[in-house]
Image: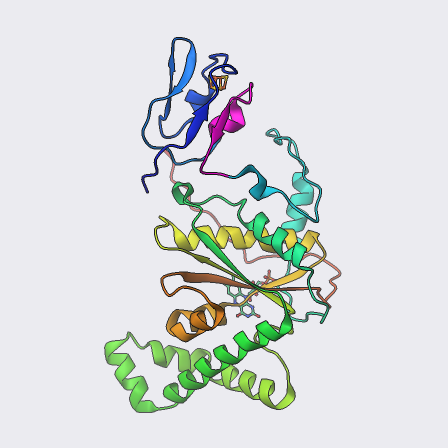
Amino acid sequence: MRRRATTVIDPDKCNGCGLCIQVCPSDTISLHDGKAVVTGEFSIGCEHCVAVCPEDAIRVGFSDPAATTLETIENREAWLPFGQGDTAELVRLFRSRRSCRKFAKDPVPEAVLRDLVRIGTMAPTGTNSQLWTFTVLPDREAVMKLGAAVGEFFDKLNSMAEKAAARLISKVFMKDALGEYYRDYYESVKTGLRQFREEGRDRLFHGAPAVILVGSAPGASCPAEDALLASQNICLAAHTMGLGTCLIGFVVEAMRHEPRIKKLLGIPADERIYAVIAVGKSLERYRRLTGRRRIEPRYFRG
Ligand SMILES: Cc1cc2nc3c(=O)[nH]c(=O)nc-3n(C[C@H](O)[C@H](O)[C@H](O)COP(=O)(O)O)c2cc1C
Ligand code: SF4
């Protein structure tokens, strides 16, 4: 994505050190008569120059400094130098986050949801497009409305998958997508839908009182990656803020195929949703950290 430069440098403040030029990935700035000057037409607006300038001489109009201010958490504005920060505690956080499947009814304060969205936007995006979208369902009623729409989608899908003829057609024309669904999900979805309707058991959102949908507007170079990185920020931060989270892939899948669900939530048709995060106070408590499947990295040496 080519974006016109919005970089402004205050010549009275600039000391000509050239640091901004060294870190700029777009070659937007050069040095003239001992002062940094915006000479490039384009910039990805990453603000490396803003972050590095010892004189605080640079502003980039693309970004709003207030957009990262949090309401419920202390704002620490100093850049964390390499090698500082508690890696062991960070790793403990990575390992302590667990998908929550038993949420308390307590509503999540809207200021906390706003902070989670802002924390999501602190993730990197391809070419700094920052074209994520966040749709917040702040109350259980809204979550249930989404749940009902997703339930209708899976009802339809299940009644299609039940038909051997439909599965055969899918095998020929759709790489057996319906057959795979029938084998892997049909029964559990059928049980989940029945449990929801007959017992009020919420197997989709696990009783979550709030949901954040992370998507991308058209034009992003890496929309899925952007949305998923933002989502991981949200899930990790939520844990430290006293909240459980669970990514709900079933909803992502339903929204991919059923445009009416986006319409219901007021999401424009050209946006795509990549992550649906159930959020709320967790009723689960764990005693220990667990392992992971052993993965051996492949090395290619020169
Ligand atoms: C893309 C994605 C989709 C997921 N979809 C669901 C889902 O629909 N329902 C659910 O209960 N868990 C879902 N999960 C949670 C996974 O089952 C969970 O991450 C995995 O079992 C590992 O457990 P942990 O998150 O507690 O480490 C999803 C996770 C990911 C990454
Ligand atoms: S980093 Fe700041 S002080 Fe140094 S050249 Fe760039 S604008 Fe001037």
Quadrant where the image shows the C terminus: top left
As rendered, which of 7 and 103 lies closer to the eye? Answer: 7
On screen, residue 17 versus residue 110, left or right, reads left
> For residue 144: magenta?
no
Relative to the observer, which residue lies in front, 238 or 31? 31
Residue at figure coordinates x 66%, y 61% from the top left = 244
Number of callouts in the render?
0
Residue at horizontal 49%, vertical 85%? Answer: 187
Q: Is residue 146 above or below residue 18?
A: below
Q: Is residue 45 above or below residue 91?
A: above
Snapshot quadrant of residue 97:
bottom right
Residue lying at the far left of the rendered structure: 172
Q: Is residue 102 left or right of residue 65?
A: right
* Residue 80 picture location, percent across and down: 62, 32
Report the magenta residues as a range.
Answer: 48-63
Residue at 70%, 65% (x, y): give it.
Answer: 282
| Quarter holding residue 180 | bottom left
Query: Is residue 61 within the magenta segment?
Result: yes
Does 89 appear above or below 279?
above
